[in-house]
Image: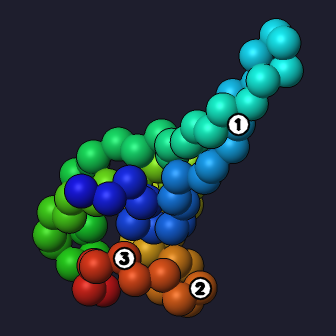
């Protein structure tokens, strides 16, 4: 399963581990993904999404239905029909 947020599109990025002696080795910074079920009262159905914690905070702020509409307007493929 890919490590991509379904709502924001966040993906792993590449950087360096830097030691005390300033040696650099490659590493990956992974997004903080959580699997979460949401109930959408407007459609009356449950949806399971794999989202990052930043998207989870925005859902708490705006509500799931409004946030899904905002993501669809930005062009993200959420996999949820509204």
Crowding near the residue tagged with mark 1, few <14, some 14–19, many ≥20 C-alpha atoms within 10 Å: few
Where 14 falls versus 45 (above or below)?
above
Q: Could you tell me which secondary element the residue under label 1 belongs to?
A: strand
Q: Earlier in the sequence, mark 1 or mark 3?
A: 1
User: In front: 74, or 42?
Assistant: 74
Q: Quick check: 22 left or right of 33? A: right
Question: Residue 78, labelled with which disc?
Answer: 3
Residue 36 in sight in this render:
yes
Task: Say which residue appears at 69% left-offset and 43% top-offset.
Answer: 15
Q: Which residue is mark 2?
A: 74
Q: Which residue is mark 1?
A: 16
Crowding near the residue tagged with mark 2, few <14, some 14–19, many ≥20 C-alpha atoms within 10 Å: few
Q: Quick check: 73 left or right of 43? A: right
Task: Say which residue appears at 16% left-offset and 72% top-offset.
Answer: 44
In this view, the mark in front (1 or 3): 1
User: In front: 25, or 40?
Assistant: 25
Where residue 80 sits, quadrant-wise, is bottom left
Where 38 falls versus 57 (above or below)?
below
User: In front: 82, or 8?
Assistant: 8
Q: Quadrant of the N terminus?
A: bottom left
């Amino acid at each position: 399963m890919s490590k991509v947020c379904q709502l924001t599109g966040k993906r792993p990025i590449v950087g360096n581990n830097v030691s005390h002696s300033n040696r650099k080795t490659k590493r990956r910074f992974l997004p903080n993904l959580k699997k979460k079920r949401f109930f959408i009262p407007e459609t009356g159905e449950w949806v399971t999404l794999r989202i990052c914690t930043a998207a989870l905070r925005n859902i708490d702020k705006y509500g799931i239905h409004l946030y899904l509409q905002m993501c669809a307007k930005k062009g993200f493929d959420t996999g949820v029909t509204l």
